[in-house]
Amino acid sequence: MPQDGRVVARGAAAAQLQAELTPIVTVGSTATLTVRLVRTDAAAAPGAQTPLDDDADRIAAGGPVTVTVVPRGLRFLVGARRSRLVRLPSGTAAEARFTMLAVDRGPAEVTVLVRGDGELPLATVRLTSEVVGSDDHGQAGLARASARIAAADPLITRRPTLRIDEEIARGRSILHAALSVGGESHRFRIRLADKARLVADVRASLARAKEVGADLPAAERADAVERGLREVGARLADHLLDRRARDLLWAHRERLDGLVVQTTGETELPWELLVVRRPGAAASDADPFLGQFGLTRWLYDVAPPAAVRLSTTTDASTARPATAIASSSVVALGSATAVGEGAAAAMRNGAGVVVECGGSGGRAVLSETFLATFSAELADGSPVDRASRRAREAARAAGEACAIAYAVYGHPDARAQAA
């Protein structure tokens, strides 16, 4: 069973993250995840001259890091901790065990994150398992994955970020979130009792908002559609953010450019549509959407490249499915691709940047303006976040109904390289 161990860190490695899990588990039984931090030779060698960052120095010196486990299809036992503070002792490995209950039949997965002081992990691995109806499967052994622990990418850590660790079991979603902006950080948790229904309701609301301007001239269409989207985005912000998070976004709205949504795999909710508004006030036409700040999405278990290739697949008429990806290329997903699931699959299959229209079930009508502008900006040397912002502006001016809802996955500072 394939397992993912991807590095979301750069620089010298102070240690290695290792994890192992039973690849098949019976529904209703428990599965034990074993996590180890093992010192690397370079970090352990006396007098090593390899430069490390603050987090790596601390790990090498035996300082603590936080190990966090995020399950899907499995859930923690009542009272169990999802995070542990771990120190790497000299000359030996540090080990932590997490016990989870198998609740959803079918594919399950566990993401293991190692964090220092910041929200961007120093390393992450993803282990997949299969939850079956009986123990008559005859498979033994352990699924294993590993990744090096090293300095987090400074081009990401210095940006405003919204971090989402999502646990899902029995249709219930728990969002363990953190907002970092303007030198302030706030951690909070949101429970979604029926995420599937919420996503369906949001998509239906987006469809209704787009229909409002369907028969209007382009000059009027954008304003009419955006008023409907702003109502959706304001309600969604109230649903997905607590009061402190909404207050922080408003207080630091001048510092939100280049915002990155970091996530273990939450790709269904249209974070770009969340409206930033004055605390206690109704949304106004002047209130921005998060997508207007050049928002990009970062999946923890892939490492998007800093250079990407442009190709004809950025044109909506030739969009490809998520399983037909050229490594490090810019990809616009086809209309048959499920929103979110396709983006994750495309990134894990080697795409450098993925563009999709949230809430539409794939490629939307009138998508040409966004994609053409996005490609042109990249070709002119703009980084992904700037290209995203300018593409949204051009699409809004053209009355494109999906302009705000586009999701862009990749490194925010990635630039196009010559073919």
Image: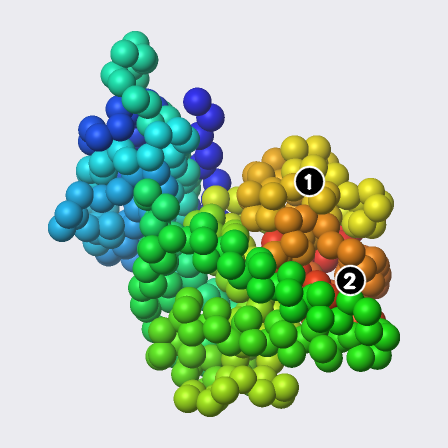
Q: Quadrant of the N terminus?
A: top left
Identify the disc placed on residue 139: none
What residue is disc 2 on?
A: 370
Foreground residue among 28 and 245: 28
From what the image shows, is residue 373 above or below residue 220?
above
For image coordinates 51% across by 76% down, the residue present is 234
- Visible in this render: residue 307? no
Q: Earlier in the sequence, mark 2 or mark 1?
A: 1
- Total number of numbered labels? 2
Q: Position of residue 172 (x, y in %)?
A: 34, 50
Question: Quadrant of the rendered structure where residue 244 is?
Answer: bottom left
- Visible in this render: residue 247? yes
Q: Amino acid at mark 2?
A: Phe
Q: Amino acid at mark 1?
A: Ala
* Left or right for 361, reference 298: right
Tag 2 secondary structure: helix
Foreground residue among 212 and 319: 212
What residue is disc 1 on?
A: 336
For image coordinates 60% across by 43% down, the residue present is 338
For image coordinates 42% across by 79% down, the residue present is 246
Is label 2 or label 1 in front?
A: 1
From what the image shows, is residue 14 above or below residue 193?
above
Extreme-left residue of the structure: 79
For image coordinates 69% across by 40% down, the residue present is 336
Tag 1 secondary structure: loop
* Left or right for 346, reference 217: left
Label 1, residues with CA under 10 Å away: few <14, some 14-19, many ≥20:
some
